[in-house]
Amino acid sequence: MNKTIKTIMMMIILTMVIGIVNISNAFSFNASLSSSDKLVAGQEVKVTLSLSGIDMDDGIRSIKIGKITVGEEFETISSTNFTSNVWMPTYSNGGLVLMSGTPIKSDGVAVTLTLKVKAGVTADSSTIKFENIVASSGSNTGDISAGTKIITIKANAPAESGDGAGTTNPPTKPSNPNGTQNETNTSTGKNTSKGTVSESASKKELPKAGESKSIVVISLILIVIVAGVLSFMKYKKTKKDSE
């Protein structure tokens, strides 16, 4: 009898662990930076943050970029440097928060950062970095990370984008400058509008965070089940000893 109960308990634990792993991998999205501008003294450079491959329950309601850093070749940025037709940007203490009145499910531009190159700049390139990009659909998904994205603006060559680990993506055209959400070809995973998210951004990335609320609930259920089984085993043992 005790052997059967132990076997059932192990099966329950294994099932719950598998469920937690599946939930932690349930939600994801991709982010990328792109620009068609070059590093020219006194000129503007527009950099767009685009989203793709959104798989987040009802969609994304908010995005947080922990820190935005630009090279010394650019003038200091402020809240007026950020524009979006879809999201409401709030820039503070070096970080950016984007809020949407309705959840966003489709690929497209999230925000455009307009930079001014300082006069007299002669550098060959300069880098912009968006660190710790996190999206959320609220308590249903928790915070899902897309990591850190960087883009290098060059004086005599197309811009190159990549991630915080140093992976570089091929030069790409910027996403829709109007900030509108673009439709995606579901058979290829690529954006089909003229203003496209880079091809590399359309590839599926593994999420770095799971659905925290459900994990907590499942963990509590697991604890209750294990405690119940152990109590039952103890009760059976005590009853048997008393007979």
Image (cartoon, rainbow, N blue to C red):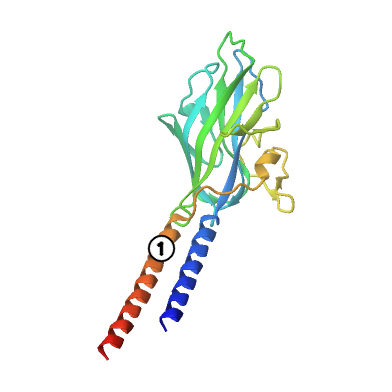
* Residue at point 51%, 17% (across, down): 75
The quadrant of the image that shows the N terminus is bottom left
Q: Nearer the viewer, residue 115 or 154?
A: 154
Number of on-image labels: 1
x, y (%) of residue 111? 56, 36
Q: Quadrant of residue 190?
A: top right
The amino acid type, in three-letter code, at marker 1 is Ser
* Residue at point 73%, 45% (across, down): 192
The quadrant of the image that shows the C terminus is bottom left
x, y (%) of residue 2? 40, 81
The residue beneath circle 1 is: 219
Q: Nearer the viewer, residue 91 or 154?
A: 154
Looking at the image, residue 8 sits to the left or right of residue 169; the answer is left
Q: Nearer the viewer, residue 116 or 212?
A: 212
96 shown above or below 144: above
* Residue at point 35%, 79% (across, down): 233
